[in-house]
Amino acid sequence: MIWPIDLAILTLVVVAAIGALMVKDLLGASVLFGAYSFMMCLLWSIMGAVDVAFTEASVGAGVSTVFFVAAVFRTSRRTRD
Amino acid sequence: MKIIGLIIVVVTGALLIYAAADFPAWSDPASPASTYLSPHFIEKTMEETSVPNIVTAVLADYRGFDTMFETTVIFSAGVVCFFLLRISRREEEEPETRYYRHVLTGVTIQLKEGYKIPPSDDFERIDAAWTPPDLIIKTGCRILIPFVQLFALYVIAHGHHSPGGGFQGGVILGASIILLAISHDLRTAVRRMSEKLMAILCAVGVFIYAGTGALCLLLKLNFLDYSALAEVLHVDPITARSHGILIVEIGVGIAVMATMIWIYNNVSSAGRYRQGL
């Protein structure tokens, strides 16, 4: 484990997570959530859990982002709170 | 209300971080899990199941009962999405005017109620809000989809030796059909993989998994003890465990693929199965 890369990715995970919660535009939030999943995937692979990283990349960053975008497309794009 | 929520989140987070300090250090060989459980898997997996990838062996064999219900959870997610979102054809009023497009020339014709076109492959039904898909995206995705599907099959079949397996391969296989639905339109994807087929495949995947377990039970061993399959497959019990893992991985792959496409179809068209994204 190379600690500067680890630290950088961990920072990006936290930034993406807070960003996905704070942003008003739901499409942006789902894209940020995809970025969060991808950073988590990198974190898993750094820790040597390649199978989990693979699942995270395909399910978290891939398909669930598509589901979120589809749901946003069919509902409203802005949150009310 | 927001402030109360923030306080709860901060307090819970602080407690979790405080509790995490008691965890054994990352990859600590003296931690309880690494002293008796992991060494067994690391040393014995190859001679017990002949599967080089320990994660796959643990997931589908040692912990197979758990994975079976994970597949059932995926299946229920698809079914729940269907029940919540799908608008049945009887409730949905069939539009009075329908639109058909001649595939070769691109001419669109409008049909009033009561009229029909002669059955032929030259016409495809389109929606009122239909927009022509971009040629570059369409062609690019058409080139890409076979390779995506081939990779997905590789991931499922090669789960014994490299990272991968039923879940990941099934998701990628489903994503290739979703890519078709995004780049063309939902009708094109549904023509290839109909709703009924998705519902059946969803259940078939779970059935393959549970059926393999029940077959082991019928062959006088424990539920999901794949070494019982040795008689059926005509191999020694250790290779039979490896083959059993492959069979259930295929079941998981089918179930996950069908569920992903099913959920996407229902979510992206709000249950109407018309124009997708």
Image (tube, coloured by chain):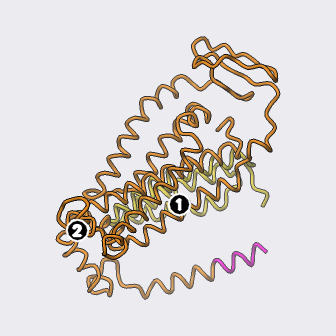
Colour given to chain B in the rendered image: orange
Q: Are marks 1 and 2 on the same chain?
A: yes
- Residue B65 left/right relative to A68: left
Name the element at disc 1: helix
Identify the image quadrant of residue B160. bottom left
Of the residues shown, which amino acid type is indicated by label 2? Thr
CA gap, disc 1 and disc 2:
27 Å
Q: Which residues are magenta?
A: B1-9
Dot 2: chain letter? B
Name the element at disc 2: helix
Colour given to chain A in the rendered image: yellow
The residue drawn where x is 31% and y is 66% is B55
Of the residues shown, which amino acid type is indicated by label 1? Ile
- Residue A33 left/right relative to B111: left
Looking at the picture, tell me which residue is in the foreground, B226 or B231: B231
Q: Which residue is mark 1?
A: B74
Q: Which residue is mark 2?
A: B49
Quarter of the image for the C terminus of chain A: give it.
Answer: bottom right
Q: Is residue B93 magenta?
A: no
